């Protein structure tokens, strides 16, 4: 009887692992439910279950994070072997009236083995690693199309050319998965790490990057995505074009319900999105060092003589792709004489604001200029 119960525990352990995915296992089979299920089939074993619970607590304290499935399997197999040996020994030993007085010794040993087997079985379930549904491994596993993977194990960037002409520059210690041929309605890739994307324009087939709880959607542009699973944040930095970033949950919910409007963040050149995994928030900001969309425009001298300051602001917007927000009526009378050569965006704004007595601040990835105007 004891050996049969231990074998039943082992079969349950293996069969449940086969039919339940790592992601959903603990939503369906918590330890308490396993105990309740076993008790229903073994109502006379309540005392065994109580002892097993105590053993689980002891194992928690002893092994902590050093427990492995192999260890639990070895322990359960060892207990099953011990039970089989005791059963065989019992069958081989002649039964005599005097030995019947020691029947309780076998009962005690059997109970100890059964308690230990049940305890180890439950402990192994309560300490199985939980795979995140947003993890790179899980997303690539459930992808609808067969994927091929590129892994950069070198110290140099690795270029990956996709079938649509898009180019991925994969940074060290990063990996990306993508289909050999994209679907008819979208171009989907999966990233774990950091990569620069230069996406071929195709309005009919949006380009989607799934990376650590986020989805980045573009039609054709260049941008950087950093999404290492061991880090607590995802960042998307736009160099050219327009990029939309969503949480994966919001994006897929909108797709399933047919909604056209999705809550997310729209980024333009020199803007950056940061998604904090703990706070579950998308935050937009200006990059620390905005770069010119047209490098030649800042490498040569720019001279403004008696020019309306609004004209200077328009030139800056065109050069850096950054939106400047200001009151045109207040600044219409402001004329400036300025010469720029190698100054960056913020240095140019400092010079302008000092000249006309204004100030600026960066809000939500845009630059807001405050001024009382010029008389």
Image (cartoon, rainbow, N blue to C red):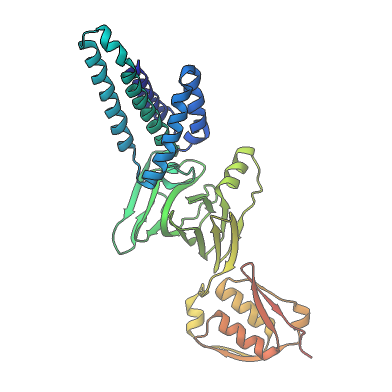
Q: Is residue 357 left or right of residue 163?
A: right
Residue 296's place in the image compared with 176, above or below, is: below
Tell me the quadrant of the picture where the N terminus can be found. Answer: top left
In the foreground, 246 or 204: 246
Please name the residue shown 47% across and 44% down the image. 132
In the foreground, 248 or 319: 248
Tell me the quadrant of the picture where the C terminus can be found. Answer: bottom right
Q: Position of residue 222 (x, y in %)?
A: 48, 62
Residue 334's place in the image compared with 106, above or below, is: below
Residue 97's place in the image compared with 5, above or below, is: above
Q: Position of residue 172 (x, y in %)?
A: 34, 61
Is residue 339 in view from this perspective? yes
Please name the residue shown 49% across and 21% down the image. 39
Q: Position of residue 194 (x, y in %)?
A: 42, 59
Q: Position of residue 277 (x, y in %)?
A: 53, 55
Q: Quadrant of residue 228?
A: bottom left
Residue 204's place in the image compared with 365, above or below, is: above
Please name the residue shown 70% across and 89% down the image. 356
């Amino acid at each position: 009887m004891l050996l049969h119960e231990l074998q039943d525990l082992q079969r349950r352990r293996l069969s449940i692992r086969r039919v339940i995915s790592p992601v959903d296992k603990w939503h369906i089979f918590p330890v308490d439910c396993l105990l309740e299920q076993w008790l229903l089939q073994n109502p006379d074993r309540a005392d065994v279950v109580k002892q097993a619970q105590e053993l689980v607590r002891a194992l928690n304290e002893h092994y902590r994070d050093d427990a492995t499935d192999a260890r639990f399997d070895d322990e359960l197999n060892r207990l099953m072997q011990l039970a089989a040996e005791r059963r065989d020994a019992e069958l081989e030993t002649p039964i005599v009236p005097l030995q019947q007085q020691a029947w309780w010794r076998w009962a005690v040993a059997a109970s100890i083995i059964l308690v230990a087997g049940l305890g180890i079985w439950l402990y192994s379930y309560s300490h199985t690693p939980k795979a995140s549904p947003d993890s790179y491994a899980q997303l690539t596993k459930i992808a609808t199309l067969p994927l091929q993977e590129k892994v950069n194990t070198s110290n140099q960037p690795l270029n990956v050319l996709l079938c649509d002409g898009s180019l991925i520059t994969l940074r060290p210690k990063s990996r990306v998965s993508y289909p050999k041929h994209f679907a008819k309605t979208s171009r989907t890739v999966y990233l774990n790490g950091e990569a620069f994307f230069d996406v071929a324009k195709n309005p009919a087939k949006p380009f989607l990057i799934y990376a650590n709880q986020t989805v980045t959607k573009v039609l054709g542009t260049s941008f950087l995505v950093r999404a290492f699973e061991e880090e607590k944040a995802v960042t998307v930095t736009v160099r050219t074009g327009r990029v939309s970033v969503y949480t994966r949950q919001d994006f897929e919910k909108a797709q399933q319900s047919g909604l056209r409007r999705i809550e997310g963040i729209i980024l333009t050149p020199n803007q950056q999105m940061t998604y904090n995994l703990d706070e579950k928030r998308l935050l937009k900001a200006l990059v620390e060092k905005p770069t010119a969309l047209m490098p030649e425009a800042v490498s040569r001298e720019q001279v403004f003589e008696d020019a309306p300051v609004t004209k200077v602001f328009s030139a800056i917007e065109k050069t850096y792709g950054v939106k400047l927000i200001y009151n045109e009526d207040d600044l219409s009378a402001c004329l400036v004489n300025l010469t720029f050569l190698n100054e960056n965006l913020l240095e140019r704004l400092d010079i302008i604001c000092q000249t006309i007595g204004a100030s600026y601040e960066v809000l939500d990835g845009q630059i807001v200029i405050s001024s009382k105007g010029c008389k």
